[in-house]
Amino acid sequence: MQSENPAVAKPTPIFLATRNRHKTREIQEMLGSGVLVTDATTVPELPEIEETGTTFEANSRLKAEGISRHVPGIVLADDSGLEVDALSKEPGVYSARYAGPGCTDEQNTALVLEKTVGVLHTERTARFRCVLAVAENGVTLATFDGTVEGILATEVRGAGGFGYDPIFMPLGYSETFGELSSEVKHGMSHRSRALAQFKQWWAARQ
Ligand code: IMP
């Protein structure tokens, strides 16, 4: 029989209001082994929260509040996306469904590239934005935001990351997030910047 080693602390559980396994994986990697991130894929009966907001903050609050009514403890939600200046900040809050309902990351990426054909390098400025909301019992306790500025590539490059990563070069790099390692991405990403603030808030609360 295996005895429990008291020197090995149990990871602190945290619930992430998403069915996007890429977000869960990234947040788990960034929070480290002291935290165990579970998400809505493990609780199929949770309701689908409609993202009716027009801002990242509104949608992250909707998801955190909606799911925290069904899950005990604090719930974290991430609303994020890509803003392309040459497209008047599209796809923005519609990033996940830019090419239509049920579309794939590849279709979204292809649509952004198609709509920016002929846009000069100097005009290809873009950014990823992320707002994290933390809620308990249907009430938002805090929100945190993070941004990473960059340039839109003209073709898909790299197989790492997810979503629009293969067409986004963070400022100072000629590689896309799809080509850069996850360590490099996590060192500067919109999500890691928002998560750093959440970690401070959480530590102060323990
Ligand atoms: P949400 O689930 O409504 O927040 O939509 C998020 C969408 O934004 C994702 O499905 C991706 O298309 C895009 N997105 C958010 N964060 C990232 C990222 O770190 N890399 C690439 N695409 C991202």
Image: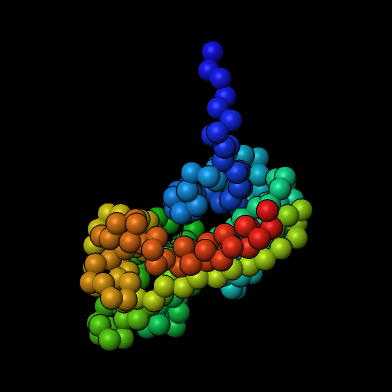
Q: Quadrant of residue 180?
A: bottom left
Q: Residue at x 63, y 63 (%)?
A: 201
Residue 53 at x, y percent in the picture: 63, 69
Up-down: is 152 above or below 97?
A: below
Horizontally, is 135 left or right of 147 in the view?
right
Q: Residue at x 61, y 43 (%)?
A: 13
**Residue 40 visible within the image:** no
Quadrant where the N terminus is found in the figure: top right
Q: In front: 95, or 6?
A: 6
**Residue 57 visible within the image:** yes
Horizontally, is 193 left or right of 11 in the view?
left
Which residue reaches farthest top? 1
Q: Residue at x 31, y 81 (%)?
A: 124
Which residue reaches farthest front? 7
Horizontally, is 137 left or right of 16 in the view?
right
Residue 33 at x, y percent in the picture: 48, 44
Q: Quadrant of residue 106?
A: bottom left
Q: In front: 86, or 174?
A: 174
Up-down: is 9 above or below 188?
A: above
Residue 20 at x, y percent in the picture: 49, 51
Number of numbered discs? 0
Residue 97 at x, y percent in the picture: 47, 62
Horizontally, is 73 left or right of 188 in the view?
right
Q: Residue at x 55, y 46 (%)?
A: 35
Q: Ligand 1 appears in which quadrant?
A: bottom left
